[in-house]
Image (spheres, rainbow, N blue to C red):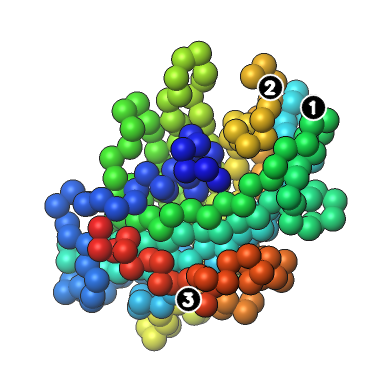
Amino acid sequence: MPLNDPPLDRRRWLQWAAAASIGGAPLLAGAATSAAPTGRQRDYLLMRGALDDRLVVAALTGQYYGVIDSELIPMFGVVAATFTRWRMLEDGRWLSASFEHAYYTDADSGEVMAQWRNPLTGRSVPAVVHTSRPTTLLLHEDLSRHHVKPLPPGAVAEDRVSAMEEVAGELVMAQRVRTALPLPAPAKPYRYSELVTVRAPLAALRDPASLQVPASMSFTNVSGWRPWQQMPADQPGHMMAHGAGRYGLTLDTLPAIWLAETRRTKPAWWADPGAHLEAAFRG
């Protein structure tokens, strides 16, 4: 996606957080001196990240729909992978650095698209390939996450855990994201909201030797039309997506279509995706 586009979703919101200080707490390249996390913070880190410096690999697949008068209109699919490292700060907060690489796929064939035919307008437009810049977020003890870099004036961002429950031998974590970005008049603010559910086995989470616990996830999001779709200015409706994925993967277990396309088009960074995160930790 062109870097001068307005934020399109939570992935683009994360780009506001790149390369900045964090309210007086230094970015640390090595181990911190504070105590290890406990309770729900430890659960969160085991499910979404790791307690050591390993590269955390996650993937998701999903389908996007246009919503007009409550009707779902298939638009396209998505297959994405994220790469993250976590480090503890001296004040007990945790800093994550991550980036994402995503492809949009044909709604019928599932193949990565070069062109997308808009079912509402009949027009074909270039389908983007999204690679985010490495970005940083802070995890607080209350399990809220905050952007490192100040947001634009009038912007709103919320990212927090709304519930954690033990159900049938699993810990189920619900996470809520709500964002809004002012745009020049007469455009309405761009909004993106997402609900994520993450599940992991309780037995592994309660094992004191665990440093990472693979977890499954599902998500639903709603947003405005994406600029790359080139929708008419007066087009009613909005976008909605749902899908699923997993945290704690290895590189060779990422989705086959994602692996094939990335090995073909991104050989320069594919050999060591985690190397792109170190500059973010240095601020």
| Occupied quadrant, residue 267 | bottom right
Q: What is the three-letter code of the residue carrying label 2?
A: Pro
Q: CA distance from mark 2 to mark 1?
A: 9 Å
Do the residues under discs 3 and 2 have CB atoms within 8 angstroms?
Answer: no
Residue 23: % across, % down: 18, 49
Q: Which mark is residue 232?
A: 2
**Nearer to the camera, 193 or 115:** 115
Identified at 66% across, 69% down, the residue is 264
Q: Is residue 54 rendered to the left or right of residue 117? A: left
Residue 136: % across, % down: 35, 56
Residue 15: % across, % down: 41, 47
Whether residue 121 is visible here, answered yes or no, is yes
**Outermost residue, top direction?**
186
Q: Is residue 132 rendered to the left or right of residue 103? A: left
Do the residues under discs 2 and 1 have CB atoms within 8 angstroms?
Answer: yes
Q: Quadrant where the C terminus lies?
A: bottom left
Q: CA distance from mark 3 to mark 2?
A: 41 Å
**Helix or strand or loop: what does disc 2 sit on?**
loop
Identified at 32% across, 60% down, the residue is 280
Dot placed on the residue nearer the N-terminal end, 2 or 1: 1
Disc 3: which residue? 272
Dot placed on the residue nearer the N-terminal end, 1 or 3: 1
**Nearer to the camera, 263 or 200:** 263
Q: Is residue 262 rendered to the left or right of residue 125? A: left
**Nearer to the camera, 228 or 86:** 228
Q: What is the three-letter code of the residue carrying label 3?
A: Asp
Disc 1: which residue? 121
Q: What is the three-letter code of the residue carrying label 1?
A: Thr
**Outermost residue, bottom direction?**
209
Identified at 60% across, 42% down, the residue is 221
| Occupied quadrant, residue 236 | top right
Residue 215: % across, % down: 55, 69
